[in-house]
Image (cartoon, rainbow, N blue to C red):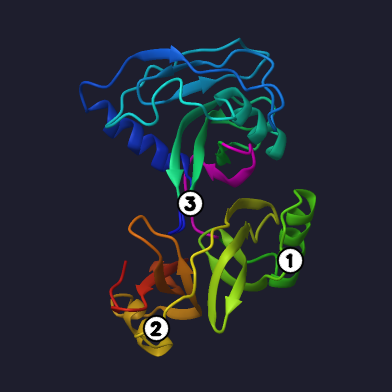
């Protein structure tokens, strides 16, 4: 996943899709990408879908058809058709179906694109699952490993009343990591309330700074279901000393949030598009609308104090 946390949501994907349609000169189809080589981690049993000039294609449920062209537009092409990635479009969709158990869904697959030293496919379901949720995910294009998932409702709401407390939710999150063989060896866990419910993060600690490897699992505190997971495993080297204190970061986070309070603050060293960045992640809560409590993290640059 991307270093500054990328929450994959269907609503974001739709907005990006609509915006992309306004850009001329990129729609169309290109040659079929190569099948997965023999001996790959994940093998595809059918040819890949035809890839558009953006590198997008629709990986259908195998019961619904062999393949289909997505035919969408884009701002700029991704990797050229025919690039030698080990994991195919169809195999990436199969990996996400196997991981989530959502065998009836078909996925719009984009990429792969380079993210923090590895190539990632981004997938968004073209419909909802039996629970009425869109399913999104990220798959490593070189290993076939699922490195992120997200379940998103058609209409986004707040976290709602807390029915499941932290310890019970942590047990759910831990069981999820065990089920999917997600390695937490040597990682320290923290918890905070978020827009999805309880957010649990396991990460390596260098002094007081959290660094990758980092694994985050969100658990809905009304249903106890895991609603998102992502991981970052990249060596960023030693983090710098922060120029902004925790108290200063918390004050900055609350500066334009009257009536809100701090739920937790964590100093984290993360990959970013322009290089590693040290940030304070300050979790706040308060009433954004009468009777509705909002929970969300505010990111403060630990070197400059800027909110981002």
* Residue 45 vertical position relative to residue 11 in the rendered view, above or below: above
Q: Gap between marks 1 and 3, in whole Å?
A: 24 Å
**Residue 292 in view here:** no
Instruction: Bin the neighbour count of mark 2 within 10 Å (Cα to Cα): few under 14, some 14-19, many 20 and up.
Output: some
Q: Earlier in the sequence, mark 1 or mark 2?
A: 1
Helix, strand or loop at mark 1: loop
x 70%, y 33%: residue = 41
Instruction: Bin the neighbour count of mark 3 within 10 Å (Cα to Cα): few under 14, some 14-19, many 20 and up.
Output: some
Q: Position of residue 109 (x, y in %)?
A: 50, 29
Q: Position of residue 68 (x, y in %)?
A: 50, 12
Q: Gap between marks 1 and 2, in whole Å?
A: 26 Å
**Residue 218 in view here:** yes
Q: Gap between marks 3 and 2, in whole Å?
A: 26 Å
Residue 83: within the magenta?
no
- Label 2 sits on residue: 242
Kindly identify which numbered label has been placed on residue 185: 1
* Residue 150 vertical position relative to residue 163 in the rendered view, above or below: above
x 30%, y 28%: residue = 74
Q: Position of residue 54 (x, y in %)?
A: 36, 26
Q: Earlier in the sequence, mark 3 or mark 2?
A: 3
Q: Position of residue 61 (x, y in %)?
A: 63, 19
Between 205 and 83, the one lying in front of the other is 83
x 62%, y 33%: residue = 129
Magenta-highlighted residues:
142-159
Q: Quadrant of residue 167?
A: bottom right
Residue 146: within the magenta?
yes
* Residue 101 vertical position relative to residue 54 in the rendered view, above or below: below
- Label 3 sits on residue: 7
Instruction: Bin the neighbour count of mark 1 within 10 Å (Cα to Cα): few under 14, some 14-19, many 20 and up.
Output: few
């Amino acid at each position: 996943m991307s270093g500054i946390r990328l929450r994959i949501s269907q609503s974001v994907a739709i907005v990006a899709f609509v915006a992309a349609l306004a850009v001329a000169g990129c729609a169309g189809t290109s040659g079929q990408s190569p099948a997965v080589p023999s001996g790959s981690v994940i093998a595809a049993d059918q040819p890949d879908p035809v890839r558009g000039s953006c590198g997008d294609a629709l990986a259908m449920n195998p019961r619904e058809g062999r393949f289909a062209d997505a035919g969408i537009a884009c701002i700029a092409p991704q990797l050229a058709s025919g690039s030698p990635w080990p994991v195919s479009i169809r195999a990436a969709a199969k990996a996400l179906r196997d991981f989530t158990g959502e065998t009836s869904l078909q996925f719009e697959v984009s990429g792969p694109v380079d993210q923090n030293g590895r190539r990632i496919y981004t997938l968004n379901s073209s419909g909802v699952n039996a629970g009425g949720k869109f399913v999104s995910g990220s798959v490593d294009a070189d290993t076939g490993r699922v490195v992120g998932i997200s379940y998103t409702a058609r209409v986004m709401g707040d976290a709602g009343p807390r029915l499941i407390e932290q310890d019970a939710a942590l047990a759910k999150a831990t069981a999820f990591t065990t089920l999917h063989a997600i390695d937490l060896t040597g990682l320290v866990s923290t918890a905070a309330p978020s827009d999805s419910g309880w957010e649990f993060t396991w990460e390596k600690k260098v002094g007081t700074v959290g660094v990758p490897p980092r694994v985050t699992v969100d658990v809905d505190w009304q249903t106890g279901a895991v609603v998102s997971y992502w991981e970052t495993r990249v060596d960023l080297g030693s983090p710098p000393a922060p120029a902004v204190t925790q108290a200063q970061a918390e004050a900055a986070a609350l500066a334009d949030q009257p009536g809100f309070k701090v739920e937790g603050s964590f100093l984290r060293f993360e990959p970013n598009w322009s290089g590693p960045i040290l940030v304070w992640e300050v979790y706040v809560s308060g009433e954004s609308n009468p009777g509705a409590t909002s929970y969300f993290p505010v990111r403060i640059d630990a070197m400059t104090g800027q909110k981002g």
